[in-house]
Amino acid sequence: MRVAVAGASGTIGLAVVRECMARGYAVTALVRTEAAEKLPELEGAETRVVDLSDPAAVVLALGEAKPASVISCIASRSGSPKDAKAVDLDANLNLLAAAGACDAEHFILLSAICVQRPRLAFQRAKLAFEAALAKADIAHTIIRPTAFFKSLSGQVARVRDGKPFLLFGDGKLTRCKPISDADLARFIVDSVGNAERYGKVLPIGGPGPAISLREQGEMLFELAGKPPRFRSISPRLFMAASRVLSLGAPFSKWFAEKAEYARIAHYYATQSMLVLDEETGEYDADATPEYGEDTLRDHYRAMLATGS
Ligand SMILES: NC(=O)c1ccc[n+]([C@@H]2O[C@H](COP(=O)([O-])OP(=O)(O)OC[C@H]3O[C@@H](n4cnc5c(N)ncnc54)[C@H](OP(=O)(O)O)[C@@H]3O)[C@@H](O)[C@H]2O)c1
């Protein structure tokens, strides 16, 4: 069975391609540059450079590959409103149309758990595509993971270098169940042709338990063998920055984008990456499904040991 993976050069796309190949699927990896085609991780896959903003090019690429399943791991790299619409919505719509045109049976979307409480342009773009996918005449599965290890690893070097760990507020404002690239890829590929998952929206976290930012810092200091040192930043700073930058937004794209980036920073400083209980409006760690075996602790330990 052939699987087409869009966004095959991204963090999760690469892991999904590797997992598909490990399970014996024939893989068509859709990338947007010739440099990406040569990525060593894609060796063994059929690679295709395709402009996902060009509907005819996407139809041609999928028409030639004839995949049974299409997995979209694409995402705007900037999160700016323009990129979000172009990638998270429009490019995915082109993929969906092409998947239908080549009679693919199943479309799997890598989305994000944060779309539950949409306040950002990229979240609205993802939701708009989720809605289009749900209406389309093709079996679909939507996967909404919690935080990736890479998103929680930005301060490893700070701790190693003896700098304080930066917290938002008291460091307990948000929690998540981190999931590794490999575990998420396994969860995604488990969905291929899996009729029990058709029509489902699946939030998914790593093995748990849910962990706060302060707990991430404490874990890092313990593993580094250093006494914990924290410095707190108020998330209100991001909101204030966003308000100031928004004043220039009607006159300048630069201001509009920077205002959105400040809103993104505020969002991640204040919102948990867990299932949201619609009735209470609270995030619910127990309701957030767990999957896989890789732990953030082992990931941090490996990063500290290898200096990466
Ligand atoms: N980071 C987190 O903690 C987290 C948590 C939950 C969910 N998510 C979601 O998971 C998804 C994937 O994340 P990731 O970390 O794997 O993303 P990533 O590493 O940034 O990869 C994004 C992929 O999309 C491709 N892409 C971007 N713009 C494109 C365009 N205009 N045309 C075609 N392809 C384009 C990239 O290609 P190039 O390599 O050529 O740029 C790359 O293959 C995102 O939707 C994200 O919101 C992330």
Image (tube, helix red, strand yellow):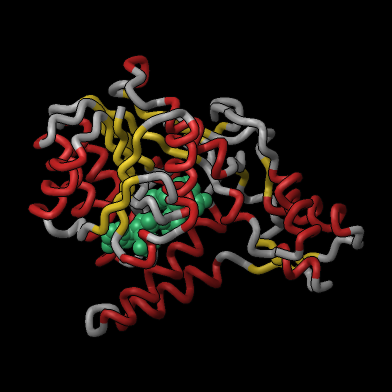
| Residue 124 seen in the current view | no
Residue 52, given in percent of the width and then of the height, sits at 20, 56
Choose top left, top right, bottom left or bottom right for residue 57: bottom left
Q: Residue at x 22, y 37 (%)?
A: 131
Q: Residue at x 42, y 48 (%)?
A: 13
Q: Is residue 45 left or right of residue 205?
A: left
Q: Is residue 72 left or right of residue 295?
A: left
Number of marks drawn? 0
The quadrant of the rendering that contains the N terminus is top left
Give the image quadrant in which the ligand numbered 1 is located: bottom left
Determine whether 232 is above or below 127 in the image.
Answer: below
Determine whether 104 is above or below 244 in the image.
Answer: above
Residue 296, given in percent of the width and then of the height, sits at 69, 45
Q: Residue at x 54, y 30 (%)?
A: 288
Nearest to the observer: residue 249 or residue 4: 4
Nearest to the observer: residue 303 or residue 112: 303
| Residue 111 seen in the current view | yes
Nearest to the observer: residue 82 or residue 9: 9
Choose top left, top right, bottom left or bottom right for residue 199: top left
Determine whether 196 is above or below 286 in the image.
Answer: above
Determine whether 90 is above or below 72 in the image.
Answer: below
Residue 79, given in percent of the width and then of the height, sits at 37, 63
Residue 270, given in percent of the width and then of the height, sits at 55, 54
Nearest to the observer: residue 227 or residue 97: 97
Q: Residue at x 72, y 63 (%)?
A: 156
Q: Is residue 114 left or right of residue 167?
A: left
